[in-house]
Image (cartoon, rainbow, N blue to C red):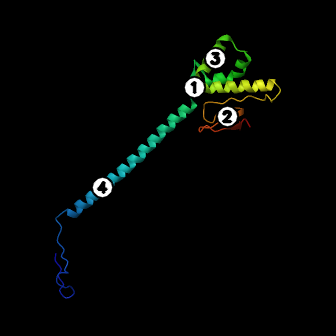
Amino acid sequence: MTTNNTNSEQPGDATEWQECETGAISGMVRHLKGRRRTTFALQLTGAVSVGIFAGLLFVHFRDNASADPTFADISCRKVQEHAEDYIAGDLPADLKKQIAAHLDECPHCQDIIRDMKRKAKSGADGSGSSGPTATVSHERSRRTPVGIRRSQWGVTHLAVSGF
């Protein structure tokens, strides 16, 4: 198709339209639609992959946060439950031996027992109040009835629960 209007156009400015091959426009439309579908599929796949990865990370850290470390076949929780009796020497020999083996391997429980001994000694000397002893848990944000709460970032603060 050629349109040639010589009255309004000057020579050399004429724009000539040529016919497209049969099916060229519909082929271009199919191509563009295909690219749009491919882009959408890639974006959806990426979003689903990120969601699955985030879910797996959540499950991994949730399960690890609730795990109670165990050394010498006794968990940190059990050592902390029996800590006062261990310090006082009021435990059966086999449990006392197991806790001692645990303390050889676990620096966290060593610190707790050392602090409790220090507090018990200062309370016996009359220089400080013996008060309730607190247990610190390996778990993130585990609350004790009255005691110390340690968050996942290692920040320690007083926690009072049970109200």
Residue 86: image x %, image y %? 70, 18
Seen from the viewer's position, the closer of residues 151 and 62 is 151
**For the C terminus, which image quadrant?**
top right
Using the image, tell me which numbered label, if any, was put on residue 143. Answer: 2
Kindly report which numbered mark, 2 or 1, lies closer to the viewer in this rendering: 1
Locate residue 61 relative to residue 13 in the image: left or right: right
Among numbered discs 4 and 2, the one appearing first in the sequence: 4
Looking at the rendered structure, the kind of residue marked 4 is Arg
Q: Earlier in the sequence, mark 4 or mark 1?
A: 4
Whether residue 152 is situated above or below residue 127 in the rendered picture: below
Residue at 64% from the left image edge and 11% from the top image edge: 94
Q: Nearer the viewer, mark 4 or mark 2?
A: 2
Q: Amino acid at mark 3?
A: Ala
Left or right side of 137 for 30: left
- Residue designated by label 1: 69
Q: What whole-number distance in Å separates the C-alpha atoms at marks 4 and 2?
A: 55 Å
- Is 50 left, or right, of 130 in this rendering? left
Spot the residue most to the bottom: 7
> Which of the two discs, 3 and 4, sits closer to the camera?
3
**Tag 2: residue type?**
Arg
Please state which of residues 41 and 138 is positioned toward the viewer in this rendering.
Answer: 138
| 98, 124: nearer the viewer | 124
Crowding at mark 4 (Cα within 10 Å: few <14, some 14-19, many 20+): few
**Label drawn at residue 100:** 3
